Image (cartoon, rainbow, N blue to C red):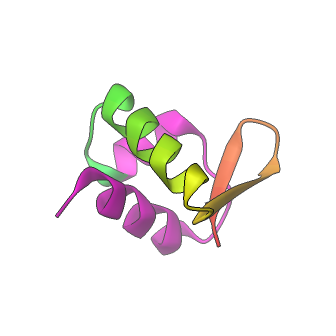
Amino acid sequence: MEPKEQVLKAMKAKAAPMGTQEIAAAAGLDVKVVEKAMKVLKTEEAIYSPVRCKWQAK
């Protein structure tokens, strides 16, 4: 599974806004890997930020 898929899966499992550190812990990935994956997910509009510094899957 690709890192972006792992990130999206972790975000959907929680179904609440999450910070980067929290996403990394839930997905079992390094924070830098999560940040790269989130950058791609943002451009694909698969995630959004309902609260400052927190992200959620659409």
The reply to whether the magenta stretch includes residue 27 is no
Viewed as shown, does residue 44 lie left or right of 3? right
Image position of 39 with respect to 44: above or below = above
Q: Image quadrant of residue 5? A: bottom left
| Residue range corresponding to the magenta coloring | 1-26
Main SS of residues in magenta: helix
Residue 56, position in %: x, y?
Answer: 64, 60
Q: Residue at x 26, y 41 (%)?
A: 29
Quarter holding the C terminus is bottom right
Residue 46, position in %: x, y?
Answer: 57, 66
Residue 25, position in %: x, y?
Answer: 36, 43
The reply to whether the magenta stretch includes residue 8 is yes
Viewer-nearest residue: 54 or 43: 43
Quarter holding the N terminus is bottom left
Q: Residue at x 28, y 32 (%)?
A: 30
Residue found at the very far top of the displayed protein: 32
Residue found at the very far front of the displayed protein: 43
Q: Residue at x 61, y 50 (%)?
A: 18
Q: Residue at x 36, y 26 (%)?
A: 32
Viewed as shown, does residue 33 lie left or right of 53? left
Q: How many marks?
A: 0
